[in-house]
Amino acid sequence: MAIFDWRASRRNFLATSGLFSSWAGFLPRRLFGASSTARPRAKKPSSIYERLGVRTRINAKGTYTYLTGSLLPPEVAEAMTDAAQHYVLIEELQRAVGAKISSLLGVEAACVTSGAAGALTLGTAACVTGSDPEKIKRLPETAGMKNEVIIQKAHRYGFDHAVRNVGVRLVEVETEDDLERAINEKTAMMHFLNEAQNQGKIGLEKWVEVGKRRGIPTFNDAAADVPPVSHLSDYNKMGFDLVCFSGGKGLRGPQCSGLLLGRKDLIDAALLNNNPNEDTIGRPMKVGKEEIAGLYVALERYLKVDHEAEWKAWEKQLDLMDKEVTSVPGIHTGRFVPEVANHVPHLYFQWDETALGLTKAECVKQLEEGEPSVVCLGDDYPYGLSVTPFMMKPGEEKIVALRLKQVFIEAQKKRAAG
């Protein structure tokens, strides 16, 4: 007499029913009835910013650190994820990546820093201490060292704090005669702000010429001066001993990364002042393996980009915004490209503020406080309220145009009802 094994039958039933359920997913729902297979849709996982209660913005302004710089291309994010899976020696990684970057750009040496501001501190430290381990340990105490940095008065800016962190004194000059007189046995470096190259009385070439002739290292802060791509090597080839760029702006690398390019002896000294070396001024300015790898891949990518096609795409985005917004009576537009930094096409908007009852500042505020939030340029340039597609995602130009149009139309309605 056969004995019924309920355990085996249960296993067979579950296996069969599981297979049947799998098939059912491919069969028309009408065979089973809508109610038999209907399941509540899983809620789409919220973004990290939604979970944190932090509002996202559409960046129609450009590369600004407070707006978190740029967005990582997929290959850069992938490289950072890959780098995060392994242990390496930071110094070995820095030197390997530095050699690759210097070869790609045709410069003498390179290293990855914690942003362009980190490069300012490390480059200045290199000019003050060289490779002397005792001097490196003493910073920012600089008594008995070369501890003066010459800068044009017109080039003073918030980021020269990163230079002063080393413990140097900034010596301001205005004319070439001032510069020649200011150089002495305490002069460690001559600092130049590339964004202000058309301000002040001493230009790029003259600054380099004096530095070479007097044996003083020259440093050019070109943080936001990409594009064009040629600038990544132009200033070193011009003769600047050190040049820095932000990694998280036009290069679209990690926001907390930067590039320091220049003379090999100074780059070597900068690395000695840097993480992971303890008891150095650069130890708190840690740049991790993920950022080093990410910036390298971002640079590789950037050098391969079809920049002419990219420019044409930006112009096309501006065409769409221009056409949409100027459909509102009384709104006039124009184009411009900043001479230095964020050197990409921009579109500006002008109107009679009194007639419309809307000021430029009010328009900027409404754009940022509305939904979705759009951040644009207000008084940054003399042309009027302006936008650039430089840091926009594809398709966001349509949203920006509609938001602008909405603000202008609402102002007209309010004025008419007024």
Image (cartoon, rainbow, N blue to C red):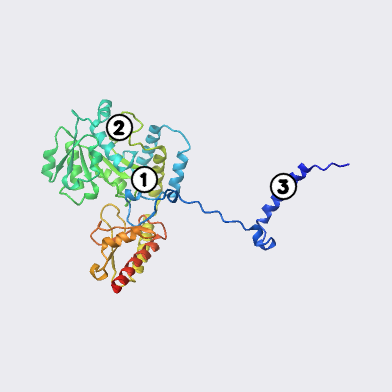
Q: Residue 209 placed where, x, y %?
A: 18, 42
Give the distance between the C-alpha atoms of the residues marked 3 and 1, in whole angstroms. 52 Å
Label number found at residue 273: 2
Q: Residue 19 placed where, x, y %?
A: 70, 50
Asked whether 365 or 324 is in front, the reply is 365
Check disc 1 and give the amino acid type.
Answer: Gln
Residue sitting at the far right: 1
* Residue placed under numbered mark 3 in the picture: 14
Pick whichever of labels 1 and 2 is earlier in the sequence: 1
Residue at position x 29%, y 69% from top? 331
Q: Residue 278 placed where, x, y %?
A: 33, 29
Pick whichever of labels 2 and 3 is earlier in the sequence: 3
Pick whichever of labels 3 and 1 is earlier in the sequence: 3
Check disc 2 and give the amino acid type.
Answer: Asn
207 horizontally vs 3: left or right: left
- Displayed quadrant of residue 293: top left
* Residue placed under numbered mark 1 in the picture: 255
Residue at position x 47%, y 41% from top? 82
